[in-house]
Image: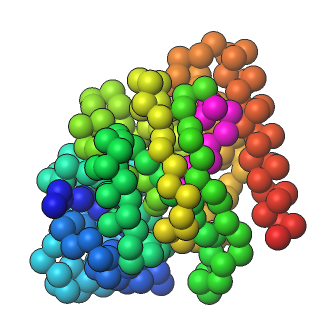
Amino acid sequence: MALVSVIIPYFKKKKYICSSVKSVLNQTYKKFEIIIIYDDEEKKDLNLIKNIQKKDRRIRLILNKKNIGAGQSRNKGIKFSKGKYIAFLDSDDLWEKNKLKEQINIIKRKNIKISHTSYNLINNHDKIIDTREAKYLNFKNLLYSCDIGLSTVILRKNLIKKNIKFGKTKTKEDYILWLKITKKNISFYPIKKNLTKWRKLSDSLSSSVMQKIFDGFKVYYTYMKFNIFKSLFYLLLLSINYMRKDKKFKKN
């Protein structure tokens, strides 16, 4: 049984972090380590996180000296991880108890390098408000629409290289990594089961439209090295797809 490293960056989510970690500890697949990267300079919630760490010897804690953001925190967690496989979980999201087992079994059986699953969107009361279906994604179709739930992804650690890692943007840091991986002719394998619950919070950084537009341009221009016109073209397509999904979500 291969070791899975579960990377959880933490920043001011004390209302949800206990439930998130519990959803990992309740997994039917037991060979994992949890790496929590504490990314809050204020340290107000540090005792809470330390108490969570004491509950299970598989939980490790990394303290950032200053706030470096979720993407850089995940890069740091990967650097200190020991697993053959890397799984990501945001500190307000949840996993179904068979998530790791089902996903790892498929990855091994089909010799997959990276996969994602379908997932449910939930509100701050854990009520399901929408669903997203996992799709087969390569570099070409990922360029104009990022339909990947970060907390659904498991990948082989050897995919992460010096120049293939999470970006330094405030949002879309995961999108940068997905594009860099798929650019190497590696596709996302979809598992069409709702094995994750992704929390939709209106006050989250990922909900800021202007920030997403700014970071979206950086994805193409700075990280993909597209010229300004090509960058604006794909940013327009990305924005249109985002608005379509947002409109559908509001209808539901």
Residue 17 occupies which quadrant of the picture?
A: bottom left
Report the quarter where the N terminus lies: bottom left
Magenta residues (range): 141-149
- Residue 123 image position (x, y, % from top left): 65, 78
Residue plotted at (41% across, 23% down): 184
Which of 111 and 120 lies nearest the eye of the viewer? 111
Measuring from the top left, give residue 236's x and y in whole percent: 77, 31
Which residue is located at x 54 percent, y 64 percent?
Answer: 193
- Horizontal side of 99 relative to 195 (left or right) equals left
- Compared to residue 110, the image places residue 11 above or below, namely below
Q: Is residue 86 above or below residue 231?
A: below
Residue 132: % across, % down: 65, 60
Residue 151 lies, with reference to residue 44, above or below; the image says above
Residue 220: image x %, image y %? Answer: 59, 26
Q: Is residue 167 left or right of residue 193?
A: left
In magenta segment, residue 55: no
What sort of colour scheme is used for the picture? rainbow
Query: Which residue lies at the image location 19% right of the left edge and 49% below the top edge?
Result: 84
Q: What residue sits 75% from the left and 23% below the top?
A: 233
The answer to whether residue 30 is left or right of residue 8 is left
* Residue that protrudes farthest toward the front in the picture: 109
Magenta span includes 148: yes
Q: Would residue 21 be seen by someone viewing this image from the given angle?
A: no
Q: In which quarter of the image is the C terminus?
A: bottom right
- Principal SS element in the magenta part? loop
- In this orientation, does residue 106 appear? yes
Location of residue 136 (image quadrant): top right
